[in-house]
Amino acid sequence: MKLIKNLGVLTSGGDSPGMNAAIRAIVRTALNKGLVPYGIKRGYQGMIQGDIEKIKTTDVSNIIQRGGTILKSARSKEFMTDEGMETAYKQLQKHQIDGLIMIGGDGTFRGAAAFSERFQIPSIGVPGTIDNDLNGTDFTIGFDTAVNTAVWAIDKIRDTAESHERVFIVEVMGRDAGYIALYSGIACGAEHIFVPEKKESLDEFLNDLCDDRRRKKLTNIIVIAEGDEFGGANELAKVIVKRLPIEPRVTILGHIQRGGSPTCFDRILSSRLGHAAVEAIVQGERQMMVGLVNNRITLTPFTKTTKLNKPFPKDMEKIIQVLSS
Ligand code: F6P
């Protein structure tokens, strides 16, 4: 097995709180093991452009608590083309980078699988996305912080909703994934949640709303993932206005969920996974994502990390209505 000397690190796709803590863990573990870490800016796009520099231990001082990513991030369409990949590989050769660690979500690992297969470059992934939609880890870096941000916001919304006895629809992030909606919905005692993973009957939902009013339960918090089949909060509000004598208010939380200082949980997750990623690559693991399953470090091939393989927690879904009645 060829030993790795120069290790490239990048963050790609939507950023997530805790990415900086993961970069810090990767850089310091790499230095501890005698590797030379290189930061690749703006994900795969920066790789194509050769935006690559050595990182020193002091470069990652004072970042464990900071949201965002010091390496910047991007979604690169060019990298998915033959020419894009060739150019990216030439840039790595120029800097004599012989191993890669990429922090990101499913798009990042799709790119990683194709690139590492084609050029046989040893690569390890670290799951970093607020969506928590990767198979092979119970939690992704940034999810806990995003849920806490959503909960912080929805608690405030409930205060005003209670005062005015209103129905509120709160849209949280998740283009194809309902984990933020599910977790923040349960934590805030939401009366209804809508997630892309589950088809809902509109008639049943509207009947429930009417039942609540008959029981004089006039305050209602509905949490909906942006990628739900109804098309998000504004679309759901239109349906309610059309069919019932209710005027819901809509709040879209948006990118606030992607920023902020990572929670203690995310800092520890990032530190463990960043450290584990370097250990894995040094020990000869290839084309795998590190994850945490039942509090143990695991490795999952890039090709199996897509959310299609990750079961949605049906038991949690079930308790929403019971607990909020
Ligand atoms: O990173 C995941 C995510 O925040 C999704 O929840 C959301 O749909 C998407 O990214 C938004 O991406 P962008 O910031 O590129 O619009």
Image (cartoon, helix red, strand yellow):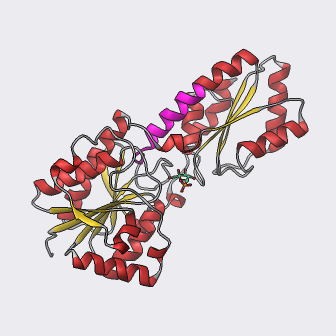
Residue 120 is at least partly visible in this image: no
Considering the image in quadrants, where does the C terminus appear? Answer: top right
Considering the image in quadrants, where does the N terminus appear? Answer: bottom left
Image position of 299 (left or right of 31) = right
Image position of 34 (left or right of 321) = left
Along the line of sight, the residue nearer the viewer: 164 or 279: 164
Residue depicted at x 15% and y 63%: 36
Residue depicted at x 70% and y 46%: 232
Tell me where residue 312 appears, x and y as whole percent. 56, 48
Which secondary structure class fits the magenta region best? helix
* Number of marks: 0
Tell me where residue 141 appears, x and y as whole percent. 39, 47
Residue 65, picture quadrant = top left
Image position of 113 (left or right of 275) = right
Tell me: residue 272, above or below residue 71: above
Residue 220, picture quadrant = top right
Along the line of sight, the residue nearer the viewer: 55 or 116: 55
Image position of 318 (left or right of 130) = right
Q: Which residues are magenta?
A: 139-155
Residue 183 is at least partly visible in this image: yes
Tell me where residue 40 appears, x and y as whole percent. 30, 64
Residue 113 is one of the magenta-drawn residues? no
Residue 142 is one of the magenta-drawn residues? yes
Residue depicted at x 29% and y 77%: 91
Tell me where residue 173 appears, x and y as whole percent. 58, 46
Tell me: residue 177, above or below residue 219: below
Along the line of sight, the residue nearer the viewer: 279 or 320: 279
Residue depicted at x 58% and y 24%: 155
Tell me: residue 209, above or below residue 225: above
